[in-house]
Image (tube, rainbow, N blue to C red):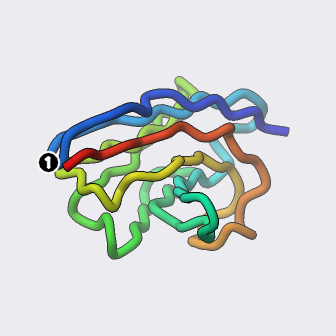
Amino acid sequence: QVHLVESGGGLVQAGGSLRLSCAASGRPFSRYAMGWFRQNPGKEREFVAAIAWSAVNTYYADSVKGRFTISRDNAKNTVWLQMNSLKPEDTAVYYCAAGTYGWAVSNYNYWGQGTQVTVSS
């Protein structure tokens, strides 16, 4: 199985930037697609971005397209989410996940603990 540990969440002003990191353990990490999701209390978990195991293909939710970038380094077993031009509506708990390439929660088998991102006005 894959164990995921997230870091990088915090408080940032609107228009600012933040980079989330997700460190993975387990083999073979490079063969898992990785995704980022976000969730607020009482709301459904929302897809943010995904990256294929080869890193050739990426996929973004319309709400973050052009502002967020997902990347990975298989040699470091790490996935990042670079978030630029942050908006208050980006505020959420962000989760990284490992599984098969796609946009649905059901695509992913392993989840991190979540990290809080708060964007102030």
Q: Amino acid at mark 1?
A: Gly
Residue in the image at 32% along x and 42% along y: 82
Q: Position of residue 30 (x, y in %)?
A: 63, 41
The percent coordinates of residue 17 (x first, y second) are 22, 39
Q: Looking at the figure, which quarter contains the N terminus?
A: top right
Please give the name of the residue rendered at 35% of the width and 56% of the height, measured from the top-left corner: 90
Q: Residues within 10 Å of mark 1 (few under 14, many from 20)?
A: some
Tell me the residue that label 1 is attached to: 15
Residue 28 or 35: which is nearer the viewer? 35
Disc 1 on helix, strand or loop?
loop
Please give the name of the residue rendered at 61% of the width and 54% of the height, measured from the top-left corner.
Answer: 33
Which residue occupies the foreground of this view, 96 or 16?
16
The residue sitting at the left extreme is 15
Asked whether, in this view, residue 99 is left or right of residue 37, the answer is right
Figure disc tally: 1
Q: Is residue 67 left or right of residue 48?
A: left
Question: Would residue 73 appear left or right of 42 to someone viewing this image?
Answer: left
Estimate the x, y position of residue 11 in percent, counting from the top left. Answer: 33, 34
Q: Is residue 26 above or below residue 114?
A: above
Q: Which residue ends up furthest to the top in the rendered image?
A: 76
Camera-side residue: 32 or 41?
41
The image quarter containing residue 59 is bottom left
In this rendering, position of residue 45 left or right of residue 9: right
